[in-house]
Structure formats: C-alpha cells, structure tokens
Image: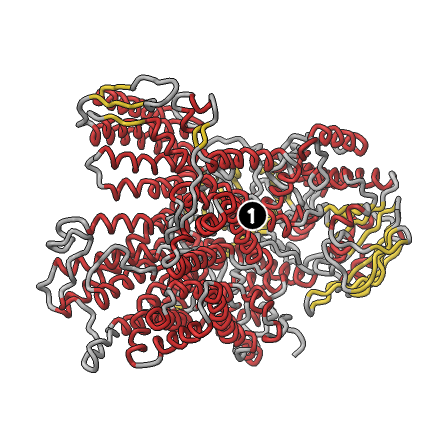
Amino acid sequence: MSDRGAVDSLLQRAAPGRAEFEDLVIVPLFAVAVALILGALTMLATGVDMATIGRSYVALLQGSVGSLGALSETLTAAVPLVLAALGLALGFRTGLFNIGAEGQLLMGGLAAVIFGFSFPGLPFPVLMPLCLLAGALTGALYAAIAGYLRAATGAHEVISTIMLNLISYRLLDWMLSLDWVQREGRSDPVSRSVPPNAELPRLLDWLDPNLRVHAGIFLMLLAVWAVHWLLFRSKLGFEFRASGANPDAARYAGIRASLVIVLAMALAGALAGLAGANQVLGVLGRATPGFSAGIGFDAIAVALLGRSHPVGVLFAGLLFGALEAGGRQMQVDAGVSIDLIGIIQALIIVFIAAPLLVRAIFPWGFRRRDKGGAR
Amino acid sequence: MDVELRGITKRFGPVIANEAVDLVAKGGEVLGLLGENGAGKSTLMNVLCGLYRPDEGEIVIDGRTVAFAGPGDAIAAGIGMVHQHFMLVPVFTVAENVVLGVEPVAALNRLDLAAARAKVREIGETYGLTVDPDARIEDLPVGVQQRVEILKVLFRSARVLIFDEPTAVLTPQEVEEFFQIVRALRDDGKAIIFITHKLMEILEIADRVSVLRAGRIVGGGDPGAMSRAELAEIMVGRPVRFEVERTAFTPGAPRLEVAGLTVLHDTGEVAVDGVSLTVHAGEVLGIAGVQGNGQTALIEAITGLRPAVTGRILFDGQDITDASPRARHAMGMAHIPEDRQRMGLVTDFTVAENMVLDSYYSDRFSNGPAMDWRAVNRWAAEAAEAFDVRTPTVFAQAGHLSGGNQQKLIVARELMRDTKLVIAAQPTRGLDVGSIEYIHARLMAARAEGDGVLIMSSELDEILSLADRIVVMFKGRIVAEFDASAAPPDKAAVGLAMAGAAP
Amino acid sequence: MTAIDPRAPAVADLGALRRKRGTGAALIVLAGVILLLFGDAAGDATFRLSRPRDAWVLGDLIVPALPVIQIAAALTAFLGARQFLRGGGRWTTLSLGVGLALFVMAFLVWATAGKAFSLTGMLQATMVRAVPIALGGLAATLCERVAVVNIAVEGMLLAGAFTGALMGSVIGGWGGLVSAVAVGGVFGFLLAALVVTYRMDQIIAGVVINLFVLGLTSYVSSQVFAEMRHLNNAPVFRSWKIPVLGDIPVIGPMLFDQNIFVYGALVMVAVSTYYLFHTAHGLRARAVGEHPRAADTLGIDVYRTRYIHVTLGGMVAGFGGAWFTLGSVGRFDENMTGGRGFIGLAAMIFGRWHPVGALMAALVFGFTDSLQQKLALLQTPIPSEFLAMAPYIATIVVVAGLVGRARPPAADGKPYVKD
C-alpha cells in the first residue's frame, strides 16, 4: 500500500542539532555563571570584602566536591532534592504546578518516623521498606487532596498546595506535642527517634564514621529510572503528557482528565513523601518542626532547572546538593550566610526559565534562531 | 481617499508572507482582494492597518508616504479594519467596545458613555446599522457583532474600510444585508477593501479585483469581464474542479440514530434541544447552520465528549448514549474534531505520538502498561505516507506542520483503520484548495466504502457539494431537512432555514 | 467554538439543582455540628462593645450561651431545609453565607460562655489584620485585570516589609514607607519584564521572585541585621484617631481609629475601583485583560499597559508589606509575611477580581486571623495549631467553592505575542 523507501525515510531520526545543545548545555552553564557573579555582587553590596568573597567561593567548591567528605555531603543533600523534584517534574509534565512538595515531604517524613518507632520490633528488611512506604503513601494522600480539589472543583493547585504547606507546619507542630509522638522527658517539640533497624544504612561509615552518604542514593537512582520509564515508556505517561500539553486533546482522546490529575498529584506526593522519609530515616533520625528545611521549595527549582526531565532533574539535584553542601562550608570558612545560596538558586532558575533573557544578555553565545533557516 | 501599497514585502523568519505587493484602493470603489487560505491576504492587511511593519515597501495615502508605528497611527490616518475574528471584548457593552481607545471623557478621566451612545445611534441610523448600545457583546448573535465592528470603525471616522472574510459567519440572507451596507458605504465615498476566498462574492460586490497567490499579486482587473473559472485558475494556479467526484448514492442500513437528544452547555443552558437524526451507511449527512446554534454540542454528544440529558444515541442499532469516547472509537467511530489545534492535536507532541493519540492504549501499540514505540513509529510512517502528510520525519513536532498537513494527519489517524461512521466537524476550515480537495476525496471514499458520514460545516457551499441530505440547525433544533441526493437544494431556501425562518 | 446561544430556553438546569440540594444538605449537617460541638455551653457569654476610655460607652452585650447556640442551630437547620426544598438562584449563596455566619456566632458564644470577650477589640484587630491581605489582593487584582497572574505578591510583600524596616531605621518612618513602595514597584516592574518581554511562564516567574526575595531578605537579615541591630529598628506608625468619627461605638475603633496603613488600604481600594470601572484608562486596562488582541488593533499598547499595572500592583504590595514592619513591630524577621500574599490571591478570587470584593474577602480572613489570636486568650480546649490553620483552610474552601462561578479576566495568565 505504501512505498517502502518513503516510509523508511520518515523513520530516520534527526541528529540532535546545535539548538538542543544550546538549550541543554550552554544555557544552564551561563545561568550558573551569571548567578554566581550576581551572588558575588550581592556580597559586595552587603559589605563583604573581595578577599572574603574569593574565600567563600573557594569554600563553596571545596565543600561540595573538594574531598570525599564533601562529595558525601553533596550526595546526601542531593537525594531528597532529586526525589521531591522528580515528583514535581511529573506534575509539571501533566500540567500541574505543585508547590506543595514541602508539606507532602513533612507529612511523609512524619509518617515514616511514627511508623518506625511504633513497630521497633520488626526486622530491618521489613521495617525499613515499610517506613518508606508509609512516607510515600502519606505524601501521596496529602497531595491527592489538592489533586482532588483541582479535578472536582477546579481550585487551582498553586493556591491549594501552598495552603496545604502552611497547614502541614501547624499539623506537624501539633503532632509533635502529642504524648505518643513526643520524645519522653522533652518539653520541646521533638519526636521519638527512629529505631536503628528502620534507618537507611550508611554506605561509607566503615571508611570514616562522618561520611553520611546512605542507601538513599540507590532509592534516588531507582526513582530517576522509574519516572523516566513512566513518563516516556508507559501508557500512563503518555496520558500524563497529553493531559499536560493539551487537556482538550486528551479529553478528545478518551483520557479521563480527573483521574490523571489525581493520579499525577498522588505520585508527585508519593515521591515528595519518599524524600521526607529518606531525610528522617537516612539523616535526621527524628522529626522536628520544619525538618524539611525548605527542600520542598528548592525542589521546585531543581525540577525547573532539570527541564522536568528525570535525567535533567538528577543533574540539577546534584548541582543544588553541591551548592547546599558547599554553602555550609562557605558559612563556616568565610562567615557568609548560607542564605546567599537561596539567592543564587533563584537566579539560576530565572535564567533557565527565561532563555530569551539569557540570549538577550549574551547575544554572542548563541546562533540566531530562525527555524529551518539557511544552514 | 486613495490608499496605495507599493512593493510591500513582509517576512516571518525565513517565511515570506508577502513579496513586492502593489495594491491600490480608491474612494467610492470596492476592491476585491482574492486569494486562497494562506496566500497572505490577512498579513498584507495587517500591514496596512499598522499591526505589522513591512520589511520593504511603502504605504501611500493621497499621494503622501506614511509610516505606521502601530495600529493607532493607521486609525488616525483613516484606515479601519473589520477582522475575520471579531476584535470585540465579550464582557463589555456595545458602547464600551465602540469607544475603546478613543473614549470621550469628562473630568477626572471619567468615561462619558452618554455621548458615545448618542453617536452610536447616529451612525447606526446613517448606514442602517441598528444596535442597542447597552447590550453586552456576548449576548449578541454574530451577525449583530459584525455590525458593532463596522460601527467601531466608523466611530473612528475611517475612510478606508478593510473587511477580512466578512461573510464567513453569516447566513446567505445576512450576506445580502451586509452587501447593502457595503454598497451604502461605498456610495458615501469610502474606499472598501474586501478580502475573501469566495469567488462568487467577488463577482457580486467588487468593482475591481486583485488576486494574491503565495504572497504575490498574480492578476486582477474588472470582475465583470472575468468568469468564475478564470478567477479560480488565477487564484489557485491551476484549473479547479468545482464538483466533488462521487459515486452513486446507495444508502444502506442506519449507522447512527439520534432520537430526542438534549444537551447542555457548560453554563447549564440548553445547547441541543430535542434533536433527532439518522445517518445511513453510504450516506453523507450535512449539518448546516450559523456557528453557535448547537452544532458543536451535538457533535460532542455524538462522540461522547458531552453527556446527553435526554434522548438516545444508537450506533449500528446499539445504544451508545452513555458509552465512553473510547468505546465509541473502538466500535468504529472516527471523529475529525472542529478545532484541530485545540482538540485534534497535541502540537508539542511528535507526528507519531499524534497518530496514536486516540489509539495508543490498544494492543497494537502497547505491551501491558508499556508503549510499543517501534510499532507506533512504523504505523505512523505508513499512515503519513498513505495520507500524504508532508513531514520530514514522524519525529517532527506536529505543531511545526502547515495547517493542511496537520488536518491530513488527523484525517489519517481517524480514517486509516476500519471505520463505520465518520464524524467530521469543519473538516476543511482555513485550508488551501489542494488540501480541501484531498480531504473531500477521502471523505467521499469513506462514503463509497459504506461508512456513514456526518459533516458539520458553517461553509454552506461545502455542505451543498458533499451532502446527500442536509439538515439545518437553528437555536439547538433541527428546523429543516433537504434532500440533496439527486441535485443540490436551493441555496436561498437553506439560507432562510439557517436564519430560523420556518420552511 | 463554544459560542453560547443565550436565547435557548433553560428547560433543565441540572447543575443548579444539584448545587441547591447540596447546599441544603450541607446546612442541615452544619446545624447538627453546631449542636454537637457547642451544645455543652453553660452560663452567659459577655461581649464588650466599648472600651473603658471611649467617649460614648455602650453597655456589655450579655447573652445566655446555650439558648443562643440552640437558636443558631435551629435557624441553620431551617435555612437548610428551605434550601433543600425550594431554594436556588441567589438564595443558594445567601443561605450558605448566613449559615456560616451563624456557625461562627455559635462558636464565639460557646468559646465565650462564662467569660467576657471584647467584640470591639476583635473587630479592630480584624481590620488591622485584613490590611496586608487586602493590599495583596488589590495588587493581584491590578495585575490580573491586565491578565498577568501575580504569584509574586508574597515576595513583594516581603520585600516591602524588609525595605520598610531597613530604610525606616535609616531615614525614618515616612522614608521607609516611600522606599517600600518603590521597591515593591521595582519587583512589579521586574515581574512585568520577565513575563511580558521575556515571556517567562507567569507562575514560574512569580515563584522565582518569591524565592529570590526570600533568599535576599534572609541573607541580609542574617548577614547584616544580626550584627547591626540599629539597621533593623524602625519607628512604627501609631494609630491616629479621626475626630468625631473615631468616637462612634464599635465602627469608630474599627474604621476611624487606625494607622496610616488602614486608611491607605481603604483609600486605595476606593481609588482603584473608580479607576478600573469608571475611567477611560480603566476601560483600556480591562480590555487588555479580556482581549489583548482587540486592544492592540485599537492602538492600545498592550505591553505598556501590562508594565504599568503590574508595576502599580507591585507598589501596592510594597505598601502592604511595609505594614508588617512599619505598621506593627518595627523589625524585620525572616519570612515574616507567612503566606499572607497567597491569602491575598485567594481574597482576589473570593472578591471576584474586584477591589471592593478583595477587601471584603480580606476582612473575612482578617476575622479568622484575629479570632485565632483572641481565642488564645479565652483558653478554649481547641489546640492553638488548629485555630492557626483556620485562615488557610478557609482559603482552600473559598477557592474550591467559588472557582468556576467567579469569572477571571479572559486572557488571564496568557502571554500576548504580537507577531
């Protein structure tokens, strides 16, 4: 019925062009460089002298990749960021702007802690996975509230997830003051500790007990693979992406929009909950008010920086993890507040999310873009 | 007032929309600007009304060269355009829309709508354009909305009036009324530029014609001295068949039966009010009607995208009233949706992904929960080849294809399988003649294979040339039915029904 | 095309029927909840209507707690039954509103039973706490009326608060106020530049500005303020009582015995209502929000209009942000706006994109907010964390309940691309 050669030529994949390379490599590099420069200017403006600025950026580098310990810290910081950001990326691909990773993370982490200290007698191979599962499920349920509201009433998830974040802080405070959650003999809001057989095992403590990198990195890599498979290889992923790119066309194709929204939100919440569980089981060992430390918000940046692609998210998460770990070193060595990292992160996203802006600032770095123009 | 375009060239990136176009419009004359969809007519007029700046060439008004920095300058120079898609704010009143941008104000910048209302009435009486100045635009029928657009232009004292495809949304009777208004304006000394791709309109209204093809002026002259076929050949660049080739009409058993169907809008108002109709195998049923009379909701109900409040829908005798779109698809219903960009395609997806948009879940394209991309791509390439979808590869983004190729992609997706019933809504809107001919031929082929074909179009000519039977919808009801199996029915009679006159 | 033919008769409005029934049932349930939760009240509830130093002193309002609660429950149940059987149309919203008001009243009476509670004080606090929310909502309204979604209201409030504290400490209260407005305007301009000129996604741009302001203010606050406390010690605008009007019982303290932020908010709401709905420029602005292309064809500069209004919105938010420091504590703390900007967005939706509506909605939020503060004093058995959640839960309920019925500007959130 059809010409074989013509069909085959339609199946030829084009090699990735210069435009893709610019988008995936050059723009992010420019973004990071400009953000660091603007960060330096910020320090200058607040009376930090040049020598200290230099020292702080050296510390940033040393603290992130300068030693085995630094690498361990970078990885430890990257794991929850990547996990939560994968969930957010899943949401973005489905057209859902989930700001609520912070709250989902808190609820998931709290659930993992409670499950852990409630069943201290279970053996490690049972208890640890169940704790993770408890975190994921709780995060999923908490996120599904916003998903359900969006699907059933059209309430925009941006507002509802922000409110759920604020509610989660109060809920956590209240839970931590309950008799059966609060650590015995403490009047401040601290939960009981996770039993050792629920903890994510550390990987390198046989080398040096200070190396905190733990089994969470396997969880992270597994999640990257799983989300990639889900988005690009599965039927469900096709439905997610179609709903995100064109909800009307998805409806036309017989995809049930409400189901997709609730499911995507729940999956995003599960990943954020997993990130929370990872923190309490791998790093903190207990829950305290605000133990999420803004990871849920940084994850938004990570997901945007990674262009909502699982592999991109992995690299973006490693970068942000490095900034986080290096920032702590910076605070110690140079006495520059770690809040500077927040500024740098925000600037990176601005430049990533507005490629037109980067092209306007560095016109010489890019080819002019006329689609299909002269080669 | 005379307006002259000299050597206008307008490019969008590498695409040349207009190339060295010369055009003259004189006061007291109707200039017909003829060209098929995508020939560059609207771009040219957007240059004239200041929305686009030309890359080369100049605009000369009464012998003086002018340069427009924006639409405001063009308006000040006396140029007014009635756009194809009305530029009216739906939630504003008529008076508010008319004065927008040139508002009469009292102290403290306070809007003085009383003055505006008086002027709207005055202009209305001069040209027979009666409209209630306090009515909200969204409450007005399209024909009246067009009057508001004309009022808007006249309120700004325009002396050159550009009409971009003005008859697309009107009934034949409304077209007649509209032509009366155009003649009154011309006789008042205004220069009129009338943009259309409809040959008959040029022959009827234009005093002079210029034909645009692929961005260039390719001919023109006195329409009185030209025939329809001549004009068509200049416009398309080759001889055009006006008749669609069709096999003998041999209707079979009913494919689709709709009985007493009532459907609501999202707002809760009744969109389709007790409609009954039947489409037989091997038959083309055309639904005619002015846009917004419930056709869209009817199509959505038949394809499962909108619930039926009352009534039944049968497909091959089986009740599908509550069946999902997917179930209907599986039974052999094909749906070419009304708005290809909004509903028919995911423009960010590849051609291959779009080819399986409504069948990705089937066993052919998936293994359990996973997609079988190899099968998808293979099939998409075959479908693109079979339906003449011009794309470099099946991995190209669908949004980068031309309108005609996008529509062919949809037709390929819907028809390249065993179908029994084809629902086609506005299947050729905005396409070039070549694509229109191709899609019409494909629909006729489906009919010849024994499919039932339901075509909804606001282009009455399309319905007349394709349908074996025509029903007319007005205010959610079917108000007339015409047999067209032997010869096309009287266009005026169909037009009257579209306007709601009882047959 | 989904053009609506309004002339078609509405023979069956299923949606309205379902809503009517749903509301009726909800009200009956609410009545039950009132009895169940508050049925254990005993004694009298005393509401103070005047403060001791007021010019005209009204007597206390003393009500017997249990009977009042029972009457409230009965009224709610009656409304519910009426709604269920034959309500509809405007009654639906009205009944729901009255029902919720009765619930709040019953709750107040229950919480106050056997104690005394200053109603005037709470209304005054309501107004004060409504100010940042109302200004945030007004800022968002100005932006969304020209179709720019402004999630960055939160960050602009925070920037205003920070600038108010810093500049207020350096050059005094008025200087601080003007600087806060200017900095808010700068961030408004920045948002406009990102979304209008650089076509960044509006929500991402808003989120980024929020993150950036949070990072910057936290950085300076920990890097600089921690050592140089004199930079974070601004004077506070005291309340200024308008003669005569301020002496009216109940209303006077609420509206006419306040500081400049309350008066400023009221004036801005009035001015922007006049501007948006009664002037030529307001008409153009709304046209840009509804149908930018139409506005463009008429010579209205869409980009410029968006820049101006988003910048103005930023300035309003900057003023609102200064409330946190110059209007209350005189000192900046990290992230001290605590989501008020987002609640302001909800107030905008609740208020149907109308400045007065946003103010009314802000008063509702201000009421829950001040209720939480005052109830802490009454020592109710409800954990304070739950009371603190009340405004957030109210926001979710409002957004979920009203969306779809309120209509945003048609082009809201969509970038306008000329070519």
Does residue A313 appear left or right of residue B285 in this picture?
Answer: left
Q: Residue at x 78, y 65 (%)?
A: B19
Classify residue B306 as left or right of residue B244. Answer: left
Residue in the picture at 19% in, 59% down: A113
Corner quadrant of residue C105:
top left
Residue C14 in picture, x, y percent from top left: 42, 34
- Front residue of A75/A160: it is A75
Q: Is residue B287 above or below residue A203?
A: above
Label 1 element class: loop
- Left/right placement of residue B224 relative to residue A25 reads right
In the rendering, at what x and y percent does residue B223 appear? Answer: 86, 52
Q: How is the image coloured?
A: secondary structure
Q: Is residue B10 shown above or below C372?
A: below
Q: Nearer the viewer, residue C221 or A148?
A: C221
Chain letter of mark 1 equals C
Q: Measured from the top left, where is residue B357 in percent x and y?
A: 47, 62
For residue A226, side relative to residue B303 (left or right): left
Which residue in the structure is indicated by mark 1?
C147
